[in-house]
Amino acid sequence: MKNKAIITCAVTGSIHTPSMSPYLPVTPEEIADQAVAAAEAGAAILHLHARNPADGRPTQDPEAFRPILRRIKERSAAVLNLTTGGSPHMSVEERMRPAMEFKPEVASLNMGSMNFGLFPMLERFTVLKHEWERAHLENSRDLVFKNTYKDIETILRRGTDNGTRFEFECYDINHLYNLAHFVDRKLAEPPFFVQSVFGLLGGIGPHPEDLMHMRRTADRLFGADYQWSILGAGRHQIRLASIGAAMGAHVRVGLEDSLWSGPGRLAESNAEQVRRIRRILEALDIDVATPEEARNILALKGAAGAVF
């Protein structure tokens, strides 16, 4: 039997600001349309944020998510994964609101506090549409993305009570040890969906040796009890996903993580990135998992268990 790789597509997010690419979806209609197209291209999981349509600001208001979820569910069987990361500028209670309201099959969970350096983008994108975008990037020079043990435990307990499982976003080696801490306390049950994040300033770097270090550490801590996925930020997206896939990892792409489709070329849609990584997976003789196969691999509760 061939390996099965789950493609996650992160459709839009709070890391990239809307005026950096004309192709980044902002309105509920744009986000839903791009999400459905990504699913049709092969993404089994859609990782979702929401934005204020007026100015593109990230928002965790459940009413901003509701039309997105409704539109996608009407047109796709993909697994919907809601952020609890939101934005580093939000409180944990605010960040949790969509996952608590809609009880999704999967929610993201950042596994530790960290510096979150977005300010280098100011050197590459000098013209921004909204003034808040420049302040958002500049303020990351003095920003700690707060995810304390109390924060993580709160999200874990409340989400688990709703039957939600987690995409554990691990930006550095210590985040794997944080997950192991909660595993030891029986607050997380296998299979653990470990999303290793590479290339964001403040986290582990994008070198292949960094990827290998993450893999070795996760293998030692979790053995056969975890499912590994690769997220490479920016220009590292496809290269690191390809290396990880060859080692048996699942992959994550999408305009939240990278605006690019090659050197100097902006991706015109999320589906474009999904199609690109799918071609690579198939060239490696790796089957792309369907949404139902992803549900089985990750032991999810099923779409009927979500409230939207």
Image (spheres, grey):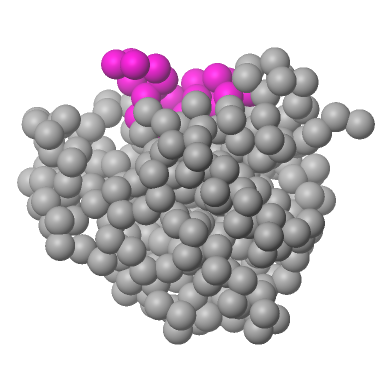
* Total numbered labels placed on residues in the image: 0
Answer whether residue 306 is visible to the viewer in this image: no
Residue 218 seen: yes
Quadrant of the rendered image containing residue 187 = bottom right
Query: What residue sits 33% from the left and 64% below the top?
Result: 114
Q: Residue 225 in the image: x percent, y percent? A: 76, 60
The image quadrant of residue 234 is top left
State the quadrant of the N terminus: top right
Percent position of residue 17, x then y: 25, 41
Q: Residue at x 50, y 21 (%)?
A: 272
* Residue 275 lies within the magenta run: yes
Q: Quadrant of residue 88?
A: bottom left
The residue sitting at 54% across, 49% down in the picture is 213
| Placement of 236 over or under 159, stated as above or below | above
Which of 9 and 103 lies nearest the eye of the viewer?
A: 9
Front residue of 6 and 226: 226
User: What is the x, y in percent for residue 171?
Assistant: 44, 55
Residue toward you, 99 or 113: 113
Residue at figure coordinates x 41%, y 20% from the top left: 261
Q: Is residue 140 left or right of residue 126?
A: right
Pick the quarter of the image with the C terminus: bottom right
Q: Position of residue 128 (x, y in %)?
A: 12, 35
For residue 188: magenta?
no
Q: Is residue 58 above or below residue 229?
A: below
> Magenta segment range?
256-278
Query: Is 263 displayed left or right of 281 in the figure?
Result: left
| Residue at the farthest right position | 1
